[in-house]
């Protein structure tokens, strides 16, 4: 009975493909996380601006 194993180039190709897929998924997850974090910061900034405008208009109405 012959001992059969996969050729080295096939093993290396599969390992490289798996590493590429893992790296791609990590990059996509990091990009999604960064864009979500940026939107939260923008929302917080808009809320602060809105409160500032309300306070400024309230101060201008006082005698």
Image: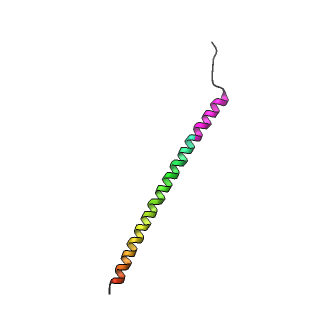
Q: Is residue 54 above or below residue 23?
A: below
Residue 34 lies left or right of residue 15; in this view the side is left
Q: Quadrant of residue 61?
A: bottom left
- Is residue 58 shown above or below 7? below
Q: How many marks?
A: 0
Residue 9 image offset from top left, x and y in percent: 67, 30
Question: Residue placed at 63% from the left, 25% from the top?
Answer: 6
Task: Please tell me whether the stretch drawn in magenta is mainly helix, strand or loop.
Answer: helix
Looking at the figure, which quarter contains the C terminus? Answer: bottom left
Task: Tell whether position 18 is magenta.
Answer: yes
Out of 11 and 61, give the one closest to the viewer.
61
Relative image position of residue 21 (x, y in whole percent): 57, 40
Image quarter for residue 17? Answer: top right
Direction bottom: furthest residue: 63
Write the residue at 36% across / 76% down: 55
Q: Say which quadrant the N terminus sits in.
A: top right
Colour scheme shown: rainbow
Above or below residue 30? Residue 55 is below
- Residue 15, magenta (yes or no): yes
User: From the viewer's perspective, is 25 left or right of 16?
Assistant: left
Q: Residue 36 placed where, x, y %? A: 46, 55
Q: State whether residue 42 is above or below residue 22.
A: below
Q: Which residues are magenta?
A: 1-20
Residue 60, percent from left and from top: 36, 83
Q: Residue furthest left?
A: 63
Q: Give the side of residue 55 with respect to residue 17, left or right.
A: left
Residue at image position (42%, 64%) is 44
């Amino acid at each position: 009975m012959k001992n059969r194993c996969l050729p080295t180039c096939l093993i290396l190709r599969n390992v490289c493909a798996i590493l590429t897929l893992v790296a791609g998924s990590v990059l996509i997850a990091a990009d999604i996380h960064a864009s979500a974090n940026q939107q939260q910061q923008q929302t917080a900034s808009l809320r602060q601006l809105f409160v500032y405008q309300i306070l400024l208009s309230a101060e201008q109405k006082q005698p």
